[in-house]
Image: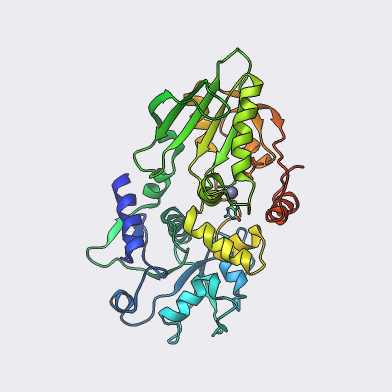
Amino acid sequence: MSARAAARAIDALRRGWPVAIGDGAAVLSLLAIETADPARLASFDPEARAPVLLSAGRAATLKLANQREAATPDAPVMVDRAPWLDLAVATALADPQLDLATPMKGPFAAIPVIAPDLAAAALQLARIAGILPAFFVRTDAADNEVSITPTDIAAHEDAARLTIAARARLPVEGAEATEIVAFRTPEMPGEHVALLIGAPDGRPPLVRLHSECLTGDVLGSLKCDCGPQLRAAIREIERSGWGILLYLRQEGRGIGLINKLRAYALQDQGFDTVDANTRLGFAIDARDFAVAARMLTLLGQCEIRLLTNNPAKVAGLEAAGVRVIERVPHHLPPNPHNERYLATKRDRTGHQL
Ligand SMILES: Nc1nc2c(ncn2[C@@H]2O[C@H](COP(=O)(O)OP(=O)(O)OP(=O)(O)O)[C@@H](O)[C@H]2O)c(=O)[nH]1
Ligand SMILES: [Zn+2]
């Protein structure tokens, strides 16, 4: 297992360099479409034979000729290479921003996915790297390519590797008796933090899992309810006597800031938050709440009350061994810009009202 391999692979993909994923039995060599250029594509695939790896959500959006219904939007699909499928066409396949502007060439045909486990790992790596989940693929590795295994990628998001790195007193607005605890793993670029608010009194703590939202938390975006929810959670925990706010670096429900902003651009075209993620080729919610469970466990809290409207957070914590004895609703008044977003969460992602 090499964490270094995953870090190098992420760096390579973002720079437009090829990466090989192998598991001993097979290898897939990948060139990310978002960061490729024509010269790199030509040297990666001189005979223009490499098929395109996409996610099922993207393939369904593109109405690929023989695309079978896949179980999840982030499952792998491969598209046969045709001579006219050059980088510009591949970019239109990868990037939904162009869907309404570019009349699709085609017909595109799906082929059986080569090395499905490796292909799924490749899409996961794209999400971690914050790039569009779309690649040219070859089934051999070139010399000098960064090479990586699915285990390396899994280690990158392995909650068990999380440890406490620092803690300090941090009076915050609305809760002056607060301590901040920062966590990290060797691999993860973003540090998760916990605010311990008030003093433990023997009762299970009131806990809020807050996923990072730069636009809402910091910039005051009205498109979502994150900023007000964050500040209200601190006040409510303080009022309850004591509890914990986990600030999880899961920007954009785990797809990263750039891809979230791509989803916002699709929302500007009329798609809702669910369809925008699917059209980009990501799961509707890519977060893994095992990381939150691990943080609570490291803080010695295995039984909690949870401030949320999202049953998936309850289920995620329970599955990772934290008992949620009560779900406490966390609603804030809507504004004209986030009404539709909140309605979509209620109607399509199981949020409770
Ligand atoms: N991909 C994507 N992410 C979004 C969008 N709007 C907000 N987010 C992200 O969604 C997350 C908000 O999550 P939370 O408020 O913690 O959780 P929740 O699932 O709404 O559940 P609650 O606990 O009921 O608030 C943050 O990571 C935001 O960046 C969107 O349109 N697309
Ligand atoms: Zn937000």
Residue 10 coordinates in the image, percent (x, y): 35, 55
Tell me, what colour scheme is on the image? rainbow
- Residue 304 appears in which quarter of the rendering? top right
Residue 219 coordinates in the image, percent (x, y): 53, 49
Q: Nearer the viewer, residue 92 or 338?
A: 338
- Residue 65 appears in which quarter of the rendering? bottom right
The quadrant the C terminus occupies is top right
Q: Residue furthest left?
A: 144
Q: Residue at x 46, y 75 (%)?
A: 91
Q: Residue at x 45, y 82 (%)?
A: 85
Q: State whether residue 318 appears in this view.
A: no
Residue 271 coordinates in the image, percent (x, y): 66, 65
Residue 346 coordinates in the image, percent (x, y): 74, 49
Q: Nearer the viewer, residue 246 or 158?
A: 246
State left or right for residue 300 relative to residue 140. Answer: right
State left or right for residue 99 relative to residue 141. Answer: right
Q: How many marks?
A: 0
Rendered view: 52 above or below 312: below
Q: Nearer the viewer, residue 169 or 151?
A: 169
Q: Residue at x 71, y 39 (%)?
A: 331
The quadrant the N terminus occupies is top left
Q: Nearer the viewer, residue 222 or 240?
A: 222
Rendered view: 29 above or below 166: below
Q: State whether residue 284 appears in this view.
A: yes
Q: Residue furthest front?
A: 173
Rendered view: 100 above or below 280: below
State left or right for residue 199 relative to residue 187. Answer: right
